[in-house]
Amino acid sequence: MRAVTKNNYEDGHQDEPDSKTDDGPLVIQARDGSVEAFEELVRKYRNQVYALCYHFVHSREDAWDLAQETFVNAHRALPSFRGESGFKTWLMRIAANRCKDHLKKRRLDTVPFDDSLSADGPSHSPQPDEALEQRELAKAIENAVNGLPLRHRTAFLLREYEGLSYQEMAEVMNCNIGTVMSRLFHARRKLQALLLGTGLLEDR
């Protein structure tokens, strides 16, 4: 398999896959040994895998390494893939597990904050007071997300950052949809409580 370069992950959104695309033929070809077919799957999903890894570890270098490991592991595990879930869901499950293993090994209990809320926010230049308020809110959100238990953070990230459906989340987290909904509910409730405690979020 050809190595995936760092620029592959950060070159924009031109590689976003069509959610209605059937990966079946490519997966079969890749499982039969086609390097080209697997590279096509990498091109389709590299941005999403990188983004998920970055949202977990909040480090571009670590996210790139974890994304690379995800595809290496997926390539090795292809013979065991039977299509019981979609290839994307299976791939995201591998990525999430790699990230959680990474955090456990480093004894980290953090989850990243989406830097688009700060550096890549609105295109207009905020006034000094507005910029300060945005930074304070961004930091509060980061701290609040960091305070969630890992299972709740995973549900929040998969839903709010990756936009997965409840069914896809259940398959990634290896649980039923009811458990997914419960974890997401608790995540949102805890985040709201933590943000209300900062005074930066008004109770309505």
Image (cartoon, grey):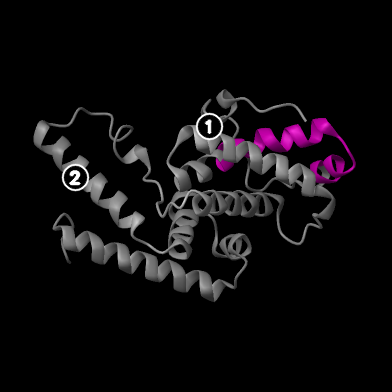
Badge 2 amino acid: Glu
Q: Position of residue 153 (x, y in %)?
A: 43, 59
Mark 1 crowd level (few <14, some 14–19, many ≥20, 10 Å Cα): few
Location of residue 34 (image quadrant) = top right
Q: How many labels does the image show?
A: 2
Query: Can residue 16 be spotted in the picture?
Result: no
Q: Where is residue 40 in the image (x, y as percent from the top left)?
A: 73, 33
SS under mark 2: helix
What's the magenta region? Answer: 26-49
Q: What residue do we see at 74% from left, 26% from top?
A: 2
Which residue is under mark 2?
Answer: 136
- Judge whether 191 appears above or below 57 on screen: below
Q: What residue do we see at 20% from left, 41% from top?
A: 134
Which residue is under mark 1?
Answer: 13
Tell whether 139 sits left or right of 128.
right
- Judge whether 126 appears above or below 199 on screen: above
